[in-house]
Image: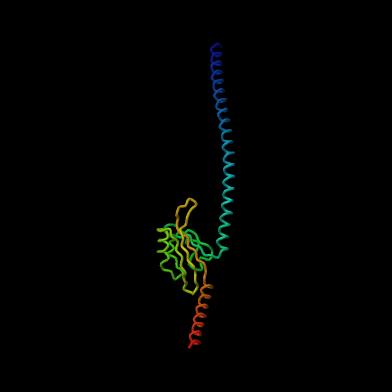
Amino acid sequence: MQSSQEELKSANEELQSTNEELQSTNEELNTSKEEMQAMNEELHVVNAEQLSKMDELSRVNDDMRNLLNSTEIVTVFLDNQLHVRRFTSGADTLFRLIASDVGRPLSDIACDLLYPEMTKEAREVLRTLVFSEKQIATTDGRWFLVRIMPYRTNEDVINGVVITFSSITAAKALEAELRAENARLKRLLETGEQ
């Protein structure tokens, strides 16, 4: 009986020791649970901030797209290798551009412009950082003021070029009419003087 009592006493001590270990483990788990809840709350705050920034970025992106489209100035954005990064609506009236052309070299895309040196001039703008501006005709008689400028990031890093195409067809037609009228008046003056 004494031996049984000693065994029970020993077993009781072991159980108390195990119980203390379990209580300690339980306290550690509770501490871990509290830390996880705090981290979860922090993640919720960060997630909410990220969602807010994504919403703001989406609105800014929509604003920029609408602004570019409303100007009716065709714009093509190229990276440093002169691959298409983005383009505005209307670009398909000058180039055979589709959405899947993003990432392709601009020189690989057929265009209506009579401007074979456009790629060479874009490379020169990248090299010198001096913009280029020319009046260029298309194969169907339209005219555009083509401007090639360096693409600058917020950190003032050059990250490609921006090419804008402003229609000047009406101005060119008016210019041709004025030249014809000036020539007619000059002939009248010359014939009237003699």
- For this orientation, the residue located farthest to the front is 193
The vertical placement of 59 against 141, above or below, is above
Q: What colouring does the structure picture have?
A: rainbow
* Residue name at image x 48 percent, y 85 percent: 190
Tell me how many marks there are.
0
**What is the x, y in percent for residue 183?**
49, 81
The vertical placement of 13 against 164, above or below, is above
Depth check, front residue: 48 or 11: 48
The vertical placement of 20 against 46, above or below, is above
**What is the x, y in percent for residue 78?**
46, 59
- For this orientation, the residue located farthest to the bottom is 194
**What is the x, y in percent for residue 39?**
56, 37
Depth check, front residue: 191 or 121: 191
Depth check, front residue: 174 or 184: 184
Quadrant where the N terminus sits is: top right
**What is the x, y in percent for residue 174?**
53, 75
Q: Is residue 82 left or right of residue 59?
A: left
